[in-house]
Image (spheres, rainbow, N blue to C red):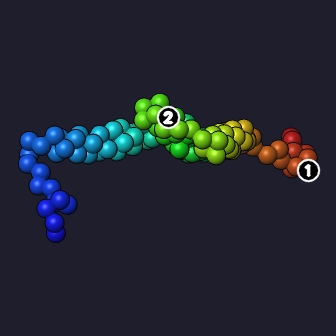
Amino acid sequence: MRDGFKRHLSPLDPLTFAIDGNTMHLTVGAGVIGWAAWYWALARGGITRVSVLQFFQPVIALVFAGAILSERLTLPLLLAASTILVGVGIARSGRDSTAPARPAEPPASAQAEAAP
């Protein structure tokens, strides 16, 4: 291997600190806090109501990429984000399956037999 492609990192190298910081962010931020928030939301809202919200993740990433990293938001990206938002809206507008179902009425013949 040529010397130009080889880099030896010392423990005090700024690149080492950046790598360690990014690793800690991914571990603590995305890992621990993300999972804790997910299970907190599941406990509060139920799987059928909360699970559809995971589709917001690419939209949130797109917003942060534009705001923090100054990424260009192109028309295809904005169309994809709007499609995701419409899909989540459609999924959330359906009947809430976590609500208890109303018990079925017994047939009229059963009601007549049960009457004294």
**Residue at coordinates 8% horizontally, 46% vertically from top-left?**
11
Whether label 1 touches label 2, CB < 8 Å: no
Q: Quadrant of residue 8?
A: bottom left
Question: Badge 2, how many Cα within 10 Å: few under 14, some, many 20+?
Answer: few
- Residue labelled with disc 2: 66
* First-in-chain label (1 vs 2): 2
Q: Quadrant of residue 69?
A: top left
**Which image quadrant: the N terminus?**
bottom left
Residue type (three-letter) at the residue carrying disc 2: Gly
Between label 1 and label 2, give the one nearer the viewer. 2
Rendered residue at 22%/45% (across/down)? 19
Seen at 12% across and 43% down, the residue is: 13
Image vertical order of residue 35 relative to residue 63, above or below: below
Q: Indicate the position of residue 82 as horizontal and vertical percent values.
A: 66, 39
Residue count near mark 1 (Cα–Cα under 10 Å), binned few <14, some 14–19, many ≥20: few
Camera-nearest residue between 46 and 63: 63
Q: Report whether 15 appears left or right of 108.
A: left
Q: Secondary structure at mark 2?
A: helix
Q: Amino acid at mark 1?
A: Ser
Distance of label 1 from label 2 (alpha carbons)? 66 Å
Q: Who is closer to the viewer here, 22 or 42?
A: 22
What's the residue at 87%, 41% (across, down)? 115
What percent of the width, then of the height, locates residue 5?
Answer: 20, 60
Q: Position of residue 9 (x, y in %)?
A: 12, 51
| Closer to the camera in the image, 92 or 81 | 81
Q: Which residue in the protein does label 1 denote?
A: 109
